[in-house]
């Protein structure tokens, strides 16, 4: 094993999954046996590190791991992987997602091949693909209130009783119509198999440079999912809606972060200058994942 070009391997484990902890322990033992430097998420994974006799004086956060390591091995489900990928800065880190969750569209490496994929990466034999990230800005009074980075999707929807609300939709600053329904999903191609698919959106290969706009339960049958070039920017303006109308409207990023938004607020979405690199499974391809997870085009 050669790791001359890699200062250290990052290891992030979902501590709530016993199997993930076991796989993390095995991976750390593998790295130690081969003399590979690594940094683990000590604050969450201390039992793993203690079990293999490793000692750290300070806890290492996920943010530090992402800034210090390449690759970063994420052991858990897609949610764990997304949480790490969203921390990617200007340097596109390589992520090896080991699936111990339920779906595993993003974390596609199986536990059985995890050490092999890490070994191949360190030897320069692995394959990977760069995934686009999207960024969303909440504009309030014409000024940016908050900004977010998304791996899968940006969602505008509401809580509470079943009552519709309206949004103006703009594409490249041109008025494109009014959306009336339960909200809208703007998804990356990699996120096309998540919430967007459940809402009737298309499956789009992650290497397609596209932006998916999928209405959520639209009132008009003609309001259909839309696929745009990812060079576009889109904007949504909430019209005449308040919590008194039946619940708050929310902006949610990847199902992990969000905030309440008000009538008159605007959400602008565009492709981010940042990206993330996912290391591919050594035994499965994209269509294998579709077949095993969605039963798509199975015999």
Image (tube, helix red, strand yellow):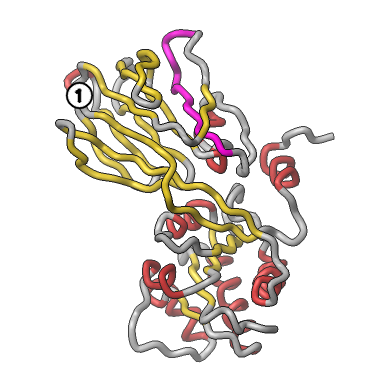
- The residue sitting at 52% across, 22% down in the picture is 226
Q: Position of residue 278 (x, y in %)?
A: 59, 57
In the image, residue 213 lies in the stretch drawn in magenta? yes
Quadrant of the rendered image containing residue 182: top left
Q: Position of residue 67 (x, y in %)?
A: 41, 70
- The residue sitting at 64% across, 55% down in the picture is 108
User: Looking at the image, which residue sits at the far right?
Assistant: 299
- The residue sitting at 55% across, 68% down in the picture is 73
- The residue sitting at 45% across, 60% down in the picture is 84
Q: Which residue lies under the disc numbered 1?
A: 264
Q: Is residue 34 visible?
A: yes
In the rendered structure, the answer to whether residue 230 lies left or right of residue 235 reads: right
Q: Is residue 180 visible?
A: no
In the image, residue 187 lies in the stretch drawn in magenta? no
- Frontmost residue, 259 versus 225: 225
Numbered range of the magenta stretch: 209-221
């Amino acid at each position: 094993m050669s790791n001359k070009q890699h200062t250290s391997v990052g290891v992030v484990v979902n501590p709530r999954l016993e199997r993930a902890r076991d796989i993390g322990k095995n991976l750390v033992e593998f790295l130690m046996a081969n003399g590979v430097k690594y940094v683990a998420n000590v604050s969450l994974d201390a039992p793993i590190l203690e079990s293999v006799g490793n000692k750290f004086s300070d806890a290492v956060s996920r943010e530090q791991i992402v800034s210090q390591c390449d690759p970063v091995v994420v052991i858990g489900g897609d949610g764990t992987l997304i949480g790490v990928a969203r921390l990617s800065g200007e340097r596109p880190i390589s992520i090896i997602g080991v699936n111990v969750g339920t779906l595993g569209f993003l974390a596609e490496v199986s536990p059985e091949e995890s050490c092999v994929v890490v070994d191949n990466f360190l030897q320069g034999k692995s394959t990977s693909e760069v995934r686009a990230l999207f960024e969303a800005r909440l504009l309030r009074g014409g000024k940016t209130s908050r900004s977010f980075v998304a791996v899968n999707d940006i969602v505008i929807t509401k809580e509470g009783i079943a009552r519709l609300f309206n949004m103006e939709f703009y594409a490249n600053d041109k008025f494109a119509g009014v959306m009336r329904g339960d909200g809208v999903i703007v998804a990356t191609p990699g996120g096309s198999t998540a919430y967007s698919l459940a809402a009737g959106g298309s499956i789009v290969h992650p290497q397609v440079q596209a932006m998916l706009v999928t209405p959520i339960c639209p009132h008009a049958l003609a309001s259909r999912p839309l696929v745009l070039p990812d060079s576009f920017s889109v904007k949504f303006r909430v019209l005449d809606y308040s919590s008194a109308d039946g619940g708050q409207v929310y902006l949610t990023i990847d199902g992990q972060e969000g905030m309440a938004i008000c009538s008159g607020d605007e959400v602008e979405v565009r492709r981010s200058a940042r990206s993330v690199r996912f290391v591919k499974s050594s035994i499965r391809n994209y269509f294998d994942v579709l077949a095993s997870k969605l039963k798509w085009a199975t015999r």
